Amino acid sequence: MIIETVDYHTAGEPFRIVASGLPPIPGDTVAERRAIALGAGGSPTSPRPSRLDTVRQLLTREPRGHAGMYGGFLVPPDDSEAHLGVLFFHKDGYSTACGHGTIALGAWAVDSGLVAAPEDGRAQVRIDVPSGRVTAVVHRSGGRTTAVTFRNVPTRVLARAVTVKTSVGELNVDLADAGAVYASLRVDEVSLGTLPGLTALGREIRSALPARYDVYGVIFHQELPDGPSGPRQRNVTVFADGQIDRSPCGSGTSARLALLAEDGLRGELWHESVIGTVFTGRVVAERDGGVVTEVTGEAYPTGEHRFVLADGDGLGTGFLLQ
């Protein structure tokens, strides 16, 4: 098995773009392809994963990946109005939305020449993701991509002050659907030193919330002094089965914006990650019972890879240490 990828990072969070070496992925839409991929991922009744899921495991496990790896399988878009489609993947499966991945894909589409762009100015990249169609606006200066703004699907507040029982007592969380559902709560500090405790607590909260919400991630946010353009917050997002977003989380930023808008937000949110990188976000419209948000960040290529699964390799698709 030989798989070729182009890797980017968005504000520190990896994104592995897989454009060749994939098996055919059945389905008429991106959402349908994700549903089929989930069903073929191996289960107690069907323990053998599909070849696609074997590729996912290969790229997200050591020694070729790591527990925090993230990426996307490029697939055809739903129709000719979009430039590409993508199935987002991580070590635990396939997500419905990924803001940092959308930013990386926008940069890659222009950098690779898939979408024409001016030396100076902007280019739009329309991407079909499982939660709908998103648009990445790629900012260019001097022939270089300097930033990407993605406009998300409408984000809706689902519930406020939902009580969950945890090992540290009862906590109240707010829920918003930004293409993926996030639970959000304020903490006193977000830092590298707090990561182990927040990761464990994020797992507890996610498992304690009612299944009907289908929560993907838990956002712990710390209030910072307001800036000249609006509120500033630092956050860490714990998603899937305890993965830590190194970036400020793109779709998570949309979720925070929807909650802040309901509280009367005016201006731009400065959203800082646990490693100090920044997304900025704003509400640009109201639609379909929610808000339309735009989130801006930077993405950079980190390498091109040709991964091999050799015959006789006893580790197979690899292992996870976390």
Image: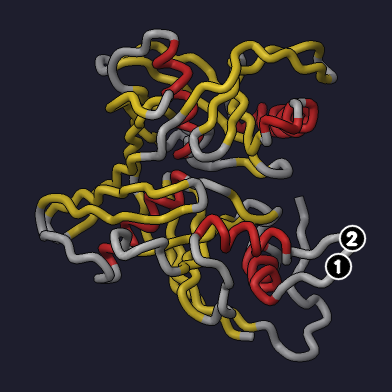
The residue tagged 2 is 44
Q: CA distance from mark 2 to mark 1?
A: 5 Å
Q: Is residue 207 above or below residue 127?
A: above
| Lateral position of residue 72 relative to residue 173, left or right | left
Tag 2 secondary structure: loop
Q: Amino acid at mark 2?
A: Pro
Task: Kindly indicate whether the residue at mark 1 contacts the one at mark 2 (C-beta within 8 angstroms).
Answer: yes
Q: Residue at x 27, y 47 (%)?
A: 147
Q: Position of residue 319 (x, y in %)?
A: 78, 65
Q: Position of residue 66 (x, y in %)?
A: 66, 59
Q: Amino acid at mark 1?
A: Pro
Tag 1 secondary structure: loop
Toward the viewer: 19 or 47? 47
Tell which residue pokes out farthest to the bottom in this image. Answer: 311
* Tag shown at residue 112: none
The residue tagged 1 is 47
